[in-house]
Image (tube, helix red, strand yellow):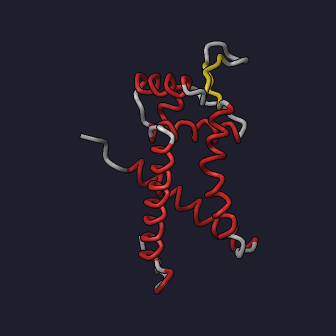
Amino acid sequence: MASQKQPAGEHGDDVLVRKLRRLTVENDRFAEVLREAHGMHRTDLNAVAVVMDATRTGRSVSPRELAEALHLSASATTALLDRLEAAGHVRRERSATDRRRVELHVEEPALELGRLLFAPLGEELAKAWTEFGDEERRIIDRFLTVTIEATVRTKKALPPKP
C-alpha cells in the first residue's frame, strides 16, 4: 500500500496528532477537576455520558451494554449503578416492551449537574468557534469523525492484555 503524502508545515499530520493529544490531555484535566469537585469517580461521569448520549439519540442502554461500553465486569457495573442510583443520577427500569430487559435512564440531578459542569465549557467553545463558517464546520466535522473512527479501529486492533 502506497503511503499518502502528508501536508507539510504547520498543518502536517505530526502537528495535528500533537494537537489532538494536547486536546485529549486538556479534556481529561477538565473532567478530573469537575469530578473531584463533585466527588464523582471518572467511571461515574463516563457512565452518565453513555446513558445521556443514548437518550439523546432515542435509544436506551441496558446495564450489559453499559458494561461493554465502559469495559467493566458485571459486578463492577452493578456497583457503579448502585452508586449512581444512590446519588440520584440514574434509575434502572424494566423495559415497557420486554420485561426481561432493564433499561437505564438519566435522572434530573445528573442533567442539572451536566449543565452546571459542562455549560461553561460549551459556551466557551461556542465563542471560540464563531469564526468558522458552514463549510469549515463540515470539514471539521468530517475530520473529527474520521479521527474518531481511526482511533476506534486502532484500539480494536491492539493485542489483548496478557
Residue displayed at 38% across by 50% down:
157
Please state if 47 lies on the left or on the right of 99 as rendered.
left
Residue displayed at 23% across by 40% down:
162
Residue 91 position in % (x across, y down)? 62, 23
Q: Residue pushed farthest left?
A: 162
Please state if 111 lies on the left or on the right of 147 as rendered.
right
The quadrant holding residue 65 is top right
Q: Residue pushed farthest top?
A: 99
Q: Give the position of the N terminus as an image quadrant.
A: bottom left
Q: Residue pushed farthest right?
A: 134
- Depicted 100 relative to depicted 44: above or below: above
Residue 129 position in % (x across, y down)? 67, 70
Residue displayed at 60% across by 35% down:
51
Residue displayed at 45% across by 44% down:
36
Closest to the observer, 152 or 32: 32
Q: Residue pushed farthest front?
A: 37
- Depicted 157 relative to depicted 109: above or below: below
Count of all numbered marks drawn on residues in the image = 0
Closest to the observer, 60 or 89: 89
The quadrant holding residue 87 is top right
Residue 35 position in % (x across, y down)? 48, 44
Residue 89 position in % (x across, y down)? 60, 30
